[in-house]
């Protein structure tokens, strides 16, 4: 759903190229989707350890997710750098030492 929203926001931005909040919305939505994909890939990797008989199925699903992630990162190259108010702001301050 978040990738769908990101793509729709980007499409709206391409229709009306005047700077607006839509690219911020697109990058923010894409970032949330990418975080979800990252976490899902990690969870599937952990499950593979517990269910070795399902390894082929898990790997197939992980491959599909990785392809989606790669395509999303290509379509939204600024998504990971997007700062989510109330979430990433505090983490950025901690990294800088503030």
Image (cartoon, rainbow, N blue to C red):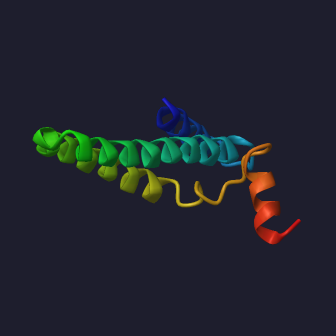
Depth check, front residue: 17 or 76? 76
Count of numbered marks: 0
Residue 22, horizontal then vertical, whole percent: 67, 41
Residue 72 in picture, x, y percent from top left: 44, 50
Q: Residue furthest right?
A: 98
Name the residue at the bottom extreme.
96
In depth, the one of 37 and 54 nearer the eye is 54
Residue 65 picture location, percent across and down: 32, 45
Residue 80 location, quadrant: bottom right
- 91 to 26, vertically: above or below: below
| Residue displayed at 61% across by 48% down | 27
Residue 24 locus on image (x, y percent):
69, 47
Outermost residue toward the top in this view:
1
| Side (left or right) of 93 relative to 51 | right
Q: Is residue 8 above or below residue 88?
A: above
Q: Is residue 39 left or right of residue 62?
A: right
User: Which residue: 73% across, 51% down?
Assistant: 88
Q: Quadrant of the C terminus?
A: bottom right
Going by the image, does 77 lie left or right of 94?
left
- Outermost residue to the front: 50
Which residue occupies the foreground of this view, 74 or 13?
74
37 is higher (above) or lower (below) than 89: above
Q: Along the line of sight, which residue is nearer the eye, 96 or 54? A: 54
Name the residue: 33% across, 46% down: 46
Residue at 67%, 54% in the rendered image:
82
Residue 6, picture quadrant: top right
């Amino acid at each position: 759903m978040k990738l769908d929203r990101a793509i729709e926001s980007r499409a709206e931005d391409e229709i009306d190229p005047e700077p607006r909040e839509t690219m911020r919305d697109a990058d923010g939505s894409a970032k949330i989707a990418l975080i979800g994909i990252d976490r899902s890939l990690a969870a599937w990797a952990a499950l593979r350890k517990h269910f070795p008989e399902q390894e082929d199925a898990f790997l197939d699903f992980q491959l599909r997710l990785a392809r989606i992630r790669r395509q999303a990162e290509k379509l939204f190259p600024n998504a990971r750098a997007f700062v989510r108010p109330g979430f990433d702001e505090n983490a950025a301050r901690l990294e800088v030492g503030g």
